[in-house]
Image (cartoon, rainbow, N blue to C red):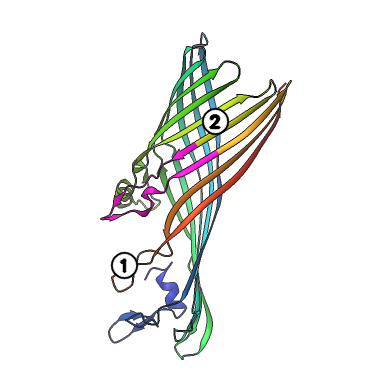
Amino acid sequence: MDEFYENLAWETYLLWKDDETSEYWHDLDENHSNYGQSQRKSISRDGYVNEYSFAVGLNFNHKLYIGASIGLLDVNFKESYELLEWDKQNKIDYFNEMQFNSHLETTGTGYNGKIGIIYKPINALRLGASLHTPTFYNLHDFFRTSMYANVADENGEMGNFEAKSRYSDYDYDLETPLKATLSAAYVIGKKGLISVDYEYADYGSASLRRGGNGYNFVNENNEIAEAYRGVGNLRIGGEFMATSNISLRAGFENYPSPYNTNAFGANQPNADSKLNVYAAGFGYRTGGFFFDVAYRYSVQNSFDLMYPEPPTDFYNMPEMVEFNSTKNNVMFTLGFKF
């Protein structure tokens, strides 16, 4: 039994073993007639990726600009989820409720490189292209699970039982996809500008490498290549100078789903899970002082399972849960130029 999953169920009397047949069983009957517990899954994620860049640039007669940079990254990510099930309808003998908790913390460092070019065929038009190398991460995972249950023990007496896995530590490398960008901007007199960026990345080329125990991730990398695809991300923005001091801005971003339509012999529900971002803001400039405000409204639909797909056909496939996510962000910038 997996010490992070099934073994916890064993230690909390959610899983039993028939000594005569050496088969494991539980208090749900084989026809699932008493299977009707309520379920709730809560997920919490937070973290950051800090990037420190060292850049150089060249200017050729204000017509051609070339730049390059090296980035050093610092990563910290935490994810916790809680799966709670309880017998609201009082249909399951010897069972009241159970809770499974999982906690993952990832830390590490990385590096990448970027090179870009901007060309001005005429003063009002700017054409650009850039290439971002893969980011090469060295990561460390800290992982732990726990389970709580209010069930009957071997004597049929109801009680509270708790089990925790050991702390698991693991080191590995991650290589993200290479990215290429084409851009254009047109300056409309002294009143404003319009810009368009198109970025391409093949997410199926991401790979895991050099596991801490010598593991080579061949199967996992094959699954990444089958599940993910290359997509083009589109960003459009505009700025209008309302006065000599005040500028109005608006933008739109479209990020298609990186999932293939079909993978592993089945349709992927998240193949249409695109992210759209709508933005608006304004800026104020006077002398060396500047102040900017931006509002971003993000919309995305996605699907997820309450728990992993069962390994056998004995259990019904869990229904996909649809998430309709919206985010509202307001950003402020205040500065002085000397």
Q: Outermost residue toward the top?
A: 61
Relative image position of residue 91 (x, y in whole percent): 45, 84
Whether residues under marks 1 and 2 lie with C-beta atoms below 8 angstroms apart, the answer is: no
Towards the viewer: 8 or 192:
192
The vertical placement of 307 against 75, above or below, is below
Q: Secondary structure at mark 1?
A: loop
Disc number at residue 149?
Answer: none
What residue is disc 1 on?
311
Towards the viewer: 70 or 32:
32
Q: Residues within 10 Å of mark 2 (few under 14, many from 20)?
A: some
Disc number at residue 53?
Answer: 2
Q: Please provide the residue range marked out in magenta.
A: 253-278
Name the amino acid, label 1.
Answer: Pro
Name the amino acid, label 2.
Answer: Ser
Determine if the magenta segment contains residue 273: yes
Q: Outermost residue toward the front?
A: 242
The mark lying in front, picked from 1 and 2, is: 1
Q: Outermost residue toward the left?
A: 265
The vertical placement of 142 against 66, above or below, is below
Q: Residue at x 52, y 15 (%)?
A: 124
